[in-house]
């Protein structure tokens, strides 16, 4: 008896947990939170932003002196003086160290005094690139957000279509069962019934496919039910001129191209500066001894130090070709920016026109649905006519949901264009 009670309690708890899992609701805000947090493109752009930030720091470090500390050990066998090459420069070894241990220490510092402005332009270039990368991250977030919004409402649309067909399918079966197989309407009724069944199967398939696409976008597994408003308020009337102007002024793509244009301009200037000389101020000190412990003793070691100025005049045979190449890249980006501007303008105007179109079409859809509902309510005698009217009602509802989804698509796009 106790075992049966425990088993029954366990089954109730399991069923309750299962029902809770099935009843999990997912809103658009939750879907956006999941998708934006785990999207690979956004994470990649965030890492690119980290790289750009580090390049700015590296460019600032170019103005600091370069410091080097090196140590050498050798056991020379010399008939004449030897120049020993290493990473910090050559070192002279005197025959005095013949068959003796050689220990050496070197400290050097080099400070750039004049580099033709190349370091300053490198810093400017890294800052512009950092700003450009921030815009790239914003674009990635915006595109991902738009994809999730469209995918969410696409799945929600399929859910509403499926719910309507499942709701009215038993009624269609009821009307069809009342039609005699010997009547002349039976063949047409059978055809209508098959079409309704096919619509039901297609709606089930679309809903599961669109739900799977949404799961992929937001990186969520398990079962859940979508919850959201699928109405079409059409609160605003879209004006093409205002939308296109706002879209061009606030376009992230255009801003990214502007930053790229600045990068190209700086690159052209840096190409000119390649022929400018480099001037460095340096200091170097060497200490050598026969024993490692003697390096700190001035009486048992030898030392040499020097402060120097180094002037280097680079001679580049590809100087002019590099300038021409950078100028061509700058011009190509200017043309690309004009193309992007026109594309944004055209897309915003199309989105505006289609938004107004679907708002008007949705109003017509509602009128048609109301009209066919009245016909269904008044028809109490002819089952074949009721079946045809029911099929037409389902088609009108499906068209309405499709138009609402298209209108919401354009609304999301306009939201990005207007930054509202």
Image (spheres, rainbow, N blue to C red):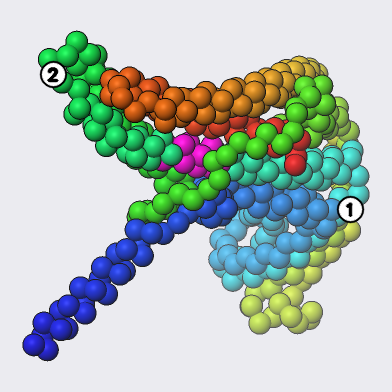
Tell me the distance, in whole angstroms, between the alpha carbons under discs 1 and 2: 105 Å
Label 1: state its secondary structure: strand
Q: Is residue 270 visible?
A: no
Q: Position of residue 238 (x, y in %)?
A: 75, 27
Q: Quadrant of residue 114?
A: top right
Task: State the extent of the magenta-drawn residues as a range.
Answer: 147-159
Q: Position of residue 159 (x, y in %)?
A: 41, 40
> Residue 224 versus residue 118: which sits nearer the camera?
224
Left or right, 275 with reference to 194: right
- On-image quarter of the C terminus: top right
Left or right, 147 with reference to 303: left
**Rendered residue at 46%/37% (across/down):** 157
- Specify whether residue 151 is painted magenta: yes
Q: Is residue 381 above or below residue 213?
A: above
Residue neighbourhood size for the residue with mark 2, other residues' Cα within 10 Å, grouped as few (<14), some (14–19), many (≥20): few
- On-image quarter of the N terminus: bottom left
Left or right, 258 with reference to 144: right
Chief SS of the magenta region: helix
**Rendered residue at 35%/62% (across/down):** 21
> Residue 398 versus residue 241: which sits nearer the camera?
398
Label 2: state its secondary structure: loop
Q: Is residue 267 above or below residue 179?
A: below
**Rendered residue at 69%/20% (across/down):** 353
Say which residue label 1 marks: 281
Q: Is residue 160 visible?
A: yes
- Specify whether residue 189 is painted magenta: no
Left or right, 415 with reference to 38: right
Say which residue label 2 marks: 181
């Amino acid at each position: 008896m106790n075992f049966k009670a425990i088993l029954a309690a366990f089954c109730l708890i399991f069923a309750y947990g299962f029902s809770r899992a099935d009843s999990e609701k997912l809103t658009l805000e939750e879907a956006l939170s999941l998708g934006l947090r785990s999207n690979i493109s956004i994470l990649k752009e965030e890492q690119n932003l980290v790289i750009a930030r580090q390049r700015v720091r590296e460019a600032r470090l170019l103005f600091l002196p370069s410091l080097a500390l090196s140590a050498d050990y050798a056991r020379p066998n010399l008939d004449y003086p030897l120049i020993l090459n290493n990473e910090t420069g050559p070192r002279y070894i005197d025959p005095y160290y013949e068959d003796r241990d050689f220990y050496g220490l070197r400290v050097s510092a080099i400070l750039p005094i004049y580099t033709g402005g190349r370091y300053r332009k490198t810093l400017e270039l890294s800052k512009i690139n950092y700003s450009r990368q921030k815009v790239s991250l914003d674009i990635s977030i915006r595109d991902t957000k738009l994809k999730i919004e469209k995918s969410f409402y696409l799945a929600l649309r399929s859910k509403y279509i499926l719910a309507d067909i499942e709701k009215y399918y038993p009624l269609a079966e009821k009307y069809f069962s009342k039609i005699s197989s010997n009547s002349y309407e039976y063949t047409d009724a059978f055809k209508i019934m098959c079409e309704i069944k096919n619509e039901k199967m297609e709606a089930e398939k679309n809903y599961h496919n669109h739900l799977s696409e949404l799961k992929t976008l937001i990186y969520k597994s398990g079962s859940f039910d979508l919850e959201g408003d699928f109405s079409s308020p059409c609160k605003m009337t879209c004006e093409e001129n205002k939308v296109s102007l706002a879209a061009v002024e606030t376009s992230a793509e255009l801003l990214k191209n502007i930053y790229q244009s600045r990068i190209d301009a700086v690159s052209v200037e840096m190409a000119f500066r390649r022929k400018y000389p480099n001037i460095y101020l340096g200091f170097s000190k060497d200490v050598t001894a026969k024993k490692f412990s003697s390096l700190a003793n001035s009486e048992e070691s030898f030392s040499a130090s020097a402060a120097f100025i180094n002037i280097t005049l680079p001679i580049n045979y590809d100087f002019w070709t590099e300038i021409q190449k950078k100028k061509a890249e700058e011009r190509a980006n200017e043309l690309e920016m004009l193309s992007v501007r026109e594309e944004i303008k055209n897309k915003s105007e199309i989105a505006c026109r289609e938004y107004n179109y679907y708002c008007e079409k949705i109003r017509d859809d509602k009128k048609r649905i109301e009209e066919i509902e009245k016909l269904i309510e008044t028809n109490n005698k002819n089952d074949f006519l009721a079946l045809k009217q029911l099929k037409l009602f389902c088609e009108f509802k499906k068209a309405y949901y499709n138009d609402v989804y298209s209108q919401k698509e354009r609304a999301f796009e306009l939201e990005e264009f207007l930054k509202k």
